[in-house]
Image (cartoon, grey):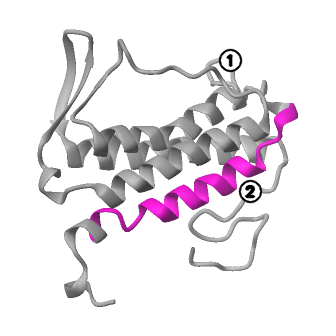
């Protein structure tokens, strides 16, 4: 497909499916028996970090489908304690994110998006900034942390962008 034939919406969401698919692969590798593992006293446990990563696609959904998030009324899910629950949670949120992207009206891209806690506005930014930085980049950042946890636990690290020592065949994924 030529770049001239891509819509603004296609350009905006070109990475979403790939990042969600790779994230699912990383989550699938996490050993349930090690969910309490912490590489450092200041680190989140593997289970807590994995639960956060599983919830990040919901941030994509909220950013695209709503004009704001009110932390005072937002659903807070408990940490996943089983591998099956973790993957089901991620899949549910990823499906919602994909649906929100498919329905997204590109005319709303530069509209402000707000995070609040009841009447207190925490931050207001353009939706594009929230989507790229607080959703996608945030997901990539924490997924990388999970890959480090995998390495420390001696669990094979999957290919994310290029090959890994555990998956040495060059893949431009």
Q: Is residue 127 magenta?
A: no
Q: Nearer the viewer, residue 69 or 165?
A: 69
Residue 157 is labelled as: 2
Residues rendered magenta in the picture? 11-33
Mark 1 nearby-residue class (10 Å; few <14, some 14–19, many ≥20): few
Position of the C terminus by quadrant: bottom right
Mark 2 nearby-residue class (10 Å; few <14, some 14–19, many ≥20): many
- Left or right of 102 in this view: 141: right
Q: Is residue 25 magenta?
A: yes
Residue, x 73% and y 79% (percent of image)? Answer: 169
Magenta span: chief secondary structure: helix
Q: Secondary structure at mark 1?
A: loop
Q: Nearer the viewer, residue 48 or 79?
A: 79
Q: Is residue 136 visible?
A: yes
Residue, x 22% and y 75% (percent of image)? Answer: 7
Residue 100 is labelled as: none
Across and down, in percent, residue 34 comes to 83, 32
Furthest-bottom residue in this view: 2
- Reply above or below: 81 against 54: above
Q: Secondary structure at mark 2?
A: loop
Q: Nearer the viewer, residue 24 or 151?
A: 24
Assess whether mark 2 and mark 1 are in contact (beta carbons under 8 angstroms).
Answer: no
* Residue underneath mark 1: 41
């Amino acid at each position: 497909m030529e770049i001239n034939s891509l819509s603004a919406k296609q350009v905006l969401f070109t990475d979403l499916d790939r990042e969600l698919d790779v994230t699912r692969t990383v989550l699938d590798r996490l050993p349930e028996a090690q969910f309490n593992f912490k590489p450092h006293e200041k680190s989140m446990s593997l289970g807590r970090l994995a639960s956060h990563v599983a919830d990040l696609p919901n941030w994509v959904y909220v950013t695209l489908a709503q004009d704001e998030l009110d932390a005072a009324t937002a659903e807070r899910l408990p940490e996943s304690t089983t591998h099956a629950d973790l993957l089901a949670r991620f899949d549910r949120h990823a499906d919602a994110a994909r649906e929100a992207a498919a329905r997204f009206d590109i005319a709303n891209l530069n509209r402000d998006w707000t995070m609040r806690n009841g009447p207190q506005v925490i931050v207001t930014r353009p939706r594009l900034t929230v989507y790229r930085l607080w959703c996608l980049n945030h997901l990539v950042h924490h997924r990388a942390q999970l890959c480090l946890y995998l390495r420390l636990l001696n669990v094979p690290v999957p290919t994310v962008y290029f090959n890994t020592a555990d998956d040495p065949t060059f893949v431009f994924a």
